[in-house]
Amino acid sequence: MQNHLEVKLGEKKDRKGPVIFSEYKRGDAIRKALSMSREDILFELKDSKLKGRGGAGFPTSTKWMLTAAAKAEKKFIICNADEGEPGTFKDRVLLMEYPELVFDGMVVGGYTIGAQLGIVYLRGEYEYLLKPLEDYLEGMRKDNLLGKIFLVKKDLILILKLFLVQVLMYAVKKQH
């Protein structure tokens, strides 16, 4: 198992392509989203024709619109970084090399749908990522990009916290 002290987040390879095609600075999307109404974000998402990463290619705007419209005391935004597909490492690569895209996306999504809590599901094999990711989130809090964000318009208060969750089943499997 890799020691968490060896992990340095955000060390990107020089990659260009259809997904990562430009430079991005942590917080840019959050600042832009907070300058927009939730409805405007949903319409922009619809116009983009962005689809989910699952096999069905479900329109992201439809999912977010339904979630935003749902009546609930609490709403959550979840990042499933389980990598359940055999031989895949995309979630680990995204979390290690592009944490700003993952976490900024969660904050924007959480704001848009009205979530109060964000959860990252991190599998047990990636325990070594836990501390660096927690440190990264602490940096976001210090930069006022996460936690209590007070919005002037419409007297709206957004409280969004992200937690990294380890898979307990992994520890149980190791004991047997």
Image (cartoon, rainbow, N blue to C red):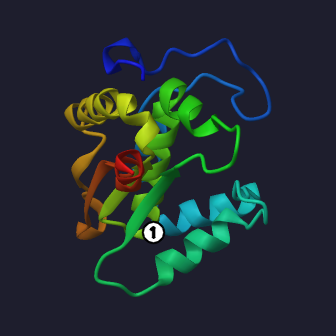
Q: Position of residue 163 (x, y in %)?
A: 29, 49
Mark 1: amino acid:
Ile
Q: How many labels does the image show?
A: 1
Q: In this view, does 27 lie above or below 118?
A: above
Residue at the image point whose x is 29% and y is 65% from the top? 116
Q: Mark 1 points at which residue?
A: 113
**Quadrant in which residue 51 is drawn:** bottom right
Quarter of the N terminus within the rendering: top left
Q: Is residue 18 above or below residue 43?
A: above
Q: Is residue 19 above or below residue 176?
A: above
Residue at the image point whose x is 58% and y is 65% from the top? 42
**Circle 1 crowding by C-alpha within 10 Å: few under 14, some 14–19, many from 20:** many
Q: Position of residue 172 (x, y in %)?
A: 35, 53
Task: Give the residue furthest to the bottom.
Answer: 71
Q: Position of residue 82 (x, y in %)?
A: 53, 49
Tell me: 75 left or right of 50.
left
